[in-house]
Image (spheres, grey):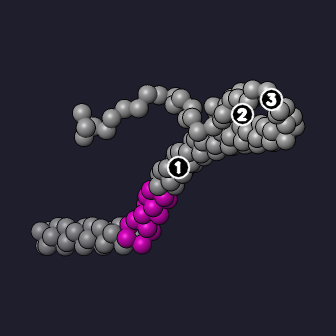
Amino acid sequence: MAVLALLRSALMILVGLCFGALGATIYASFVTVPDARLAGRQEERGIWQEAQRQAEAQREAERQAAQAQIDQIERDYHQRDAERTARMSALEAALEQEQTDVDQTPPPVAGSAPVCRPAVPRRLRDALDGIGRSTPADRAPVPSPAVR
C-alpha cells in the first residue's frame, strides 16, 4: 500500500502542477499580456509621434526657407519695378521738356542760314539710354548640360 499512497500523492502533485500551470496561463492571458500590449502600444505611439513632430519641424523649416527665398525675389522685383518706373518718369519728363523746347524755338530769321538741331537732344538721349538695357545678372549665363 505504500506504493499506492506514493503514486497517489505523486498524481496529486502532478494534477496540482497542471492546475497551477493552467491558472498561471489564464492569469497571463487576461491580466499580464494585455498590460504589456498596452504598454508596447503606448511606447510605439510615443515613438511615432516624435517622428511626426520631427518631420513637421523639418517641413516647417523647408517652408520658411522657401518663403524667405520668395520674399527676396519679390523684393528684387519691386525694386526693379521702382527703378523702371523712375526711368520711365525721367523719360517722360525729358520728352515733355523736349516738346516745350521745340515749342519755344524762335522762328528762323529771313536771310539767315538754316539751323540744324540734333535729331535727338542730349537730355532725351540720356533718358533713353537706360531704357531697354538689361541689368547685369548676378552670375554669368551657363549653357545647359545638353549643349556642352
Give the main secondary structure of the magenta stretch.
helix
C-alpha distance separating marks 2 and 1 = 53 Å
Residue 1 rendering spot, x and y as whole percentages: 13, 73
Question: Residue tagged by mark 1?
Answer: 59
Identity of the residue drawn at 85% across and 37% down:
107
Q: Secondary structure at mark 2?
A: helix
**Is residue 59 placed above or below 26 in the rendered structure?**
above
Q: Which residues, given as a range, are shown in magenta? A: 28-45
Q: Secondary structure at mark 1?
A: helix
C-alpha distance separating marks 3 and 2 = 31 Å
First reached walking from the N terminus: tag 2 or tag 1? 1
Amino acid at circle 2: Leu
**Is residue 1 placed above or below 54 in the rendered structure?**
below
The answer to whether residue 57 is visible is no
Question: Residue farthest to the front?
Answer: 111
Residue 14 rendering spot, x and y as whole percentages: 22, 69
Question: Residue tagged by mark 3?
Answer: 111
Question: Residue tagged by mark 2?
Answer: 124
